[in-house]
Amino acid sequence: MPSSALWAVDLFGRVCTLSTAAQHWELCRDAQLEFKRVSASAQCCWGIACDNRVYVRVDAGDVPIRRREEAYENQRWNPVGGFCETLLPSDRWPWSDVSGLQHRPLDGVALPSPHWEWESDWYVDENFGGEPTEKGGWTYAIDFPAAYTRDKKWNSCVRRRRWIRYRRYKSRDTWAQIPSQDDPKQLPDPFNDLSVGGWEITDEPVGHLSVWAVSLQGKVWYREDVSHPNPEGSSWSLVDTPGEVVQISCGPHDLLWATLWEGQALVREGISRNNPKGSSWSIVEPPTSENGIMHVSVGVSVLWAVTKDRKVWFRRGVNSHNPCGTSWIEMVGEMMMVDVGLNDQVWGISWADRALYFRQGVTQSELSGKTWKAIVASRECDRSHSGSSSSLLSAGCFFGDEVRGSGESCGPSDSEAERPGPDPERELQATSPASTPAELPWTNIDLKEPKRGPSHAAASFPEASDLSSLGLLPLGMEEPDGAECHPLWAWVSGGGCAVEAHTVLKWFTAQSGLSPSVQTLSLSITPAQTAAWRKQIFQQLTERTKRELENFRHYEQAVEQSVWVKTGALQWWCDWKPHRWVDVRVALERFTGQDGARDSILFVYYVVHEEKKYIHVFLNEVTALVPVLNEAKHSFALYTPERTRQRWPVRLAAATEQDMSDWLALLNLSCCESRRVHGRPSPQAIWSVTCKGDVFVSEPSPDLEAPERPLPCDQMFWRQMGGHLRVVEANSRGVVWGIGYDHTAWVYTGGYGGSSSQGLAGGPSGIYTQSDVKCVCIYENQRWNPVTGYTSRGLPTDRYMWSDATGLQECTKASTKPPSLQWTWVSDWFVDFSVPGGADQEGWQYASDFPASYHGYKTMKDFVRRRCWARKCKLVTSGPWLEVAPIALTDVSIIPEAPGAPGSEPSIALWAISDKGDVLCRLGVSELNPAGSSWLHVGTDQPFASVSIGACYQVWAVARDGSAFYRGSVSPSKPAGDCWYLIPSPPKQRLKQVSVGHTAVFALDENGNMWYRQGVTPSYPQGSGWEHVSNNVRRVSVGPLDQVWVIADKVQGSHGLSRGTVCHRTGVQPLEPKGLGWDYGIGVSGAALGGLSQWDLEARGAVPRGPREGPGGAVPSCLSVPCCQVPRGGHYGFFYGGYLCSAVTR
């Protein structure tokens, strides 16, 4: 998980940030600005300075913030002079916006603020719907407005063309003042509070933000049109309130609370995607009548409040469906303010000593947490002139009387304070002699029910009167005497700070707790000296072992052959009809030969008509052992060459997840021992990913691309690695990248193992925690009725009213489960508006009947409609992968190279597509630094979907509108090239993926047709035209020697139909670059798995996918070979004996 930052303001108005991976505060130095308070999100921070002006600070990143400005030039045909700017009085403006209603001359388009700059001058857009227009960029129509075409016809009376100009936001990593473009009479009063949130109202990549502010007169204002492409917004709008507001808090989703001068709380209702400002206010009474609410802070489903007597309160039952909540619970401690951040984590500033605290134990099942923990982190500026606060803590370890507060009890020792986790008994220990740890068990949350009456809760709970009495602070932090003990804080914001349950924070340890002599000693030993010392010890032990064994080498081997058997009870998916699960006994027999070689046989014993029978599988013939994605069974499948040709694997299921993990680990180990394959894969290995997300690797054979008798691809052996990915991409120099379902980029560390859910063996070196999030989608279907309109009652022949995307399976919200038992829900059901074809304001898509082409608007012929409901689930595992932050990716491509090829560059070319469609080039990628150093943005006129770089630095890409592009002049000295060239798509087809080899370029359209680019030469790399090669293709991947691998949609086997099959193009030669036929590899029979499983690949080489049952089975989804590259969606390559091959999936 990448690091994020906690923002805070001290009493002197200085803004500081504390990273989740650091121990020290960093000061934001900028133009001597002093701030009152700040409100942060993941990518920016808003603040109110002491001059009462609003500022925004946008984090600097490798991808610039660009905004496109466009204007349309309109002309009408004149019988005398032809097309001209002289229009009819009823026509639109000669220069207008897309609607034609607003006058928009080119010289009238100005920058919105000084924080923007123009990238270039105006130019004509010559791309129309993925196709190039005639010279000049004109599109023609009969009249304004009408459907425009790029071809001029005899009745084309009007024409228009689009002019484009990009502006770039330049004020990044600095505080930029928000410009005031409002009417001076309507300008808001100076602000005294603001809050940023609302980024989870929609999942669109535009990055919408809701910015709310409160003026000195108690009015509430909303900033319009704030998003990632427009970080400043456009204007302030006034929101009516029933009273004068003091403070406001906006959550990441749709919660908004505010406090009134009278001590009551206001709750905003009706906030939604289409109405982010909400519709009405509701009033919530304070916990007690004597002390009103002074401060509130909301998260996704929590609310914390501070009353005027500094007590902290937690609101029960707060969520999107009930934003007002149900009741109040009093928490231990006295705070000046609290703030809720990401994942509903809570921070607070103590009223007694202005110290900063973190609420530990906050989880989805326990939103109120367990206890407050002081953040022991110093600032760099403090350490430079007076030593860090941690040094004072160290001093307190030896001179406790000088730094201890006035409390009667002694605080915990410095060594205890430095432990990463809290000591429950010490942290809840009270100062009063009457209060003992037995009275305050640490397992009980420090909650108290509110008491209505004049008496305070502190009277009956003296331990709750002050945080300094709880013993929560490390020694030296109790009631500090001055600012030199710890920073004095005035405000904190955790809106951009992501802390999860497995996150290890360094905020609670004192770095300088050791004595100076110990620190000097630890610093005198360098990592190089440590490595040399370890190497020397290892060499000495190796030599000693050789000497001791030398005297026994003449003895004969005591045991020449051994046999080991493991038995158990499993279930087997039987081969005969009706296919069902049957109880079987299995036995794994492992034996060791005289030469030390190990081999194994798996026996499956079953009973048919009271007759005992068995099948056996030689593990040296197993080509893949794949876990199956199933919400009901812990199952896995074994593939052999014969079973692959039949499209019918051996399918087994265990009773528990642990049993399945044990069997998988044992069978994986036995398969690898039989083939003598162990440890880290070679740089030339082929990588793949199943649809379940499991990562597989195959060591290439020299016979794979043999010209006379090539190795059939159904005999390729795949072994499982650790981790969880959606896409993998490899290079023959050992650089491997992957992309998760949540678009997080990962880089291979060189380790092997992890993936605890599969029980894989491997060393701990290079294994890290890995998480992934994806959405499970179901569809709500309705049919129009002449009486009642659209209703959930359909015709008898209609699909289920709640179904999957195909409509063949019934899927309701209650019955839909996560993809497997390893996944857990992390959100509620929500409407997905980002479906293909668009949706209306409620998320509905319309069509004439089921199934048909859906669109986001209703017409007179639309009698059915549907909308997509999505729910997020999360998986936490481990593997040899490190996250590459902070840009989310959808596709990655690494240049395919032969190892040791002449002219190999020290840096490795890597291109990627971000989730927003930006094209990126990674700098600094090498064998020693596979993660690279930084991203270089490559400008485009539209969002892209796929990219591929060939062996000679040819970069091809496909835009989201289906058009193809070629990047010119890409070279090691000029990694980003100079310009894009629009390549016409095949007639009446929209491309979705492209793959480039040495000279060959293959593309795939949305209908599954594969095309070959003719006429590609070094002197004319754009080629001359497209030639159809094959249909029924989901993914294509081309190697550096122009080998072609694909994922076929349907392949008929002897026992069933396979969907998602790895296929190798045979007969590819210089004179026949398109090849002659297909060799079919690993795939899954739909009949074997109830007609619902399929293989799917995304890689640069051949990648297998495991079988899956039901929606989302274990199917190979991505493949990559070290020498080949893959475009988005998954094409990958692999290198064998100087040859590179690749394959892909849907």
Image: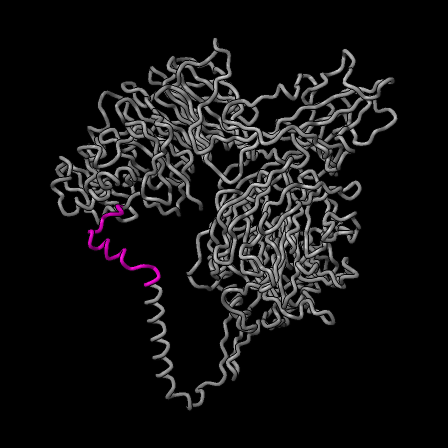
Q: Is residue 522 magenta?
A: yes
Residues drawn in magenta:
510-529
Q: Is residue 429 left or right of residue 1096?
A: left
- The answer to whether one can see residue 880 in this image is no
Q: Is residue 346 left or right of residue 1018?
A: left
Q: Position of residue 659 (x, y in %)?
A: 49, 61
Q: Is residue 183 magenta?
A: no
Q: Is residue 796 above or below residue 998?
A: above
Q: Position of residue 417 (x, y in %)?
A: 24, 46
| Picture quadrant of residue 684 | bottom right
Q: Position of residue 137 (x, y in %)?
A: 75, 30
Q: Is residue 763 above or below residue 933?
A: below
Q: Residue at x 30, y 39 (%)?
A: 445
Dominant secondary structure of the residues highlighted in magenta in the image: helix
Q: Residue at x 59, y 70 (%)?
A: 605
Q: Position of residue 819 (x, y in %)?
A: 56, 48
